[in-house]
Image: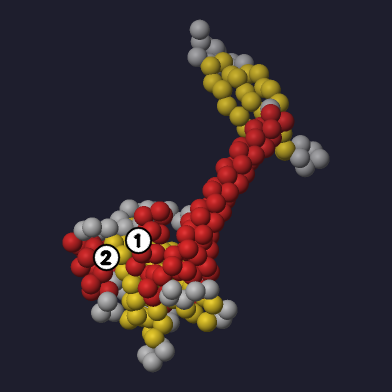
Amino acid sequence: GADSLEFENRYRCRDGSYRRLAWASSAPDPDGTTYAVARDVTERRKADELERGRMVLEAELRQRERASEDLRRLNDFMDAMLAERGSFQDACPRLLATLCRNLDWDLGEIWIPDSRTQKLRLEAVWHAPDDRLAEFAGRSREVTFAKGAGLPGLAWERSRAAWMKDLSAAAGFARATLAEKAGLRTAVATPAVDRDRLAAVVCFLAREARELDEGTLRLMSGVGLHLGQFA
């Protein structure tokens, strides 16, 4: 019955290596004496760490496989739709709707560079049925973005996907007030590039705050690269 204390600590050996010991200690006797036994659990802990690493790696591989499969299906769909519609502009509305529904985004945009103004203008937008999202979409048609300005301009400047987790705190999101009114929290934008030419910037926005996800960024980048071939 006396209470016992269990803990682990690490000791450095003379040769510079470290060993981990697991201790079991009894409560002090009335005279203050404490008895403890230690076991060397170094190899066991190494095995545990290797197992955790293996599980993390397997989960990452499964995630990449799912992302690759999702991208393959989306690419096949985009190929079929673009062939059916004949032009990128004609396919944009339905393309956005399908991408948003499949990837679980509340609003999608396609921004096209204007050769006259050298700025991005909104070519197409899709959103879930909601008056506040409709207002956000309508007001966005009044906005243009220079290279490096706003999220679309940032993706243009970087030539890769750009992610903003919290739009209310993102200094680079020019439509923060409109987004807050619409309840939008997270956004990602990816450039659609044909060789060295920017063809379009595709943006997706969601009402839930989302953590940065490398799998999602890879998927968005893949969508942008594929669209760049047709825009």
Q: Return the x and y of residue 216 as percentages of the image width and height.
A: 48, 56
Compared to residue 76, the image places residue 59 above or below, namely: above
Q: Name the residue under label 1.
A: 97
Outermost residue toward the right in this view? 15
Task: Decide if residue 128 is on the left or right side of residue 57.
Answer: left
Task: Decide if residue 193 is on the left or right side of residue 125.
Answer: right
**Which residue type carries mark 2?**
Ala
Q: Return the x and y of residue 5 as percentages of the image width and height.
A: 54, 21
User: How many C-alpha atoms fall within 10 Å of the one at disc 1: few (<14), some, or many (≥20)?
Assistant: some
Name the mark nearer the viewer: 1 or 2: 1
Residue at the image position 40 percent from the left and 53 percent from the top: 102
Residue at the image position 47 percent from the left and 59 percent from the top: 77
- Who is closer to the viewer here, 172 or 72? 72
Outermost residue toward the left in this view? 131
Q: Does residue 154 appear anywhere in the picture?
A: no
- Who is closer to the viewer here, 14 or 134? 134
Of labels 1 and 2, earlier in sequence is 1
How is this picture coloured? secondary structure
Which quarter of the picture shows residue 109?
A: bottom left
Q: Label for residue 179?
A: 2
User: How many C-alpha atoms fall within 10 Å of the one at disc 2: few (<14), some, or many (≥20)?
Assistant: many
Residue at the image position 24 percent from the left and 63 percent from the top: 133
Q: Label for residue 71?
A: none
Q: Return the x and y of residue 86 as percentages of the image width and height.
A: 43, 73
Q: Return the x and y of residue 173 as percentages of the image width and height.
A: 34, 71
Cα separation between marks 1 and 2: 19 Å
Residue at the image position 60 percent from the left and 19 percent from the top: 24
Assign a secondary structure to mark 1: helix
Which quarter of the picture shows residue 38?
A: top right
Task: Decide if residue 135 is on the left or right side of residue 189.
Answer: left
**Which residue type carries mark 1?**
Ala
- Who is closer to the viewer here, 86 or 215? 86
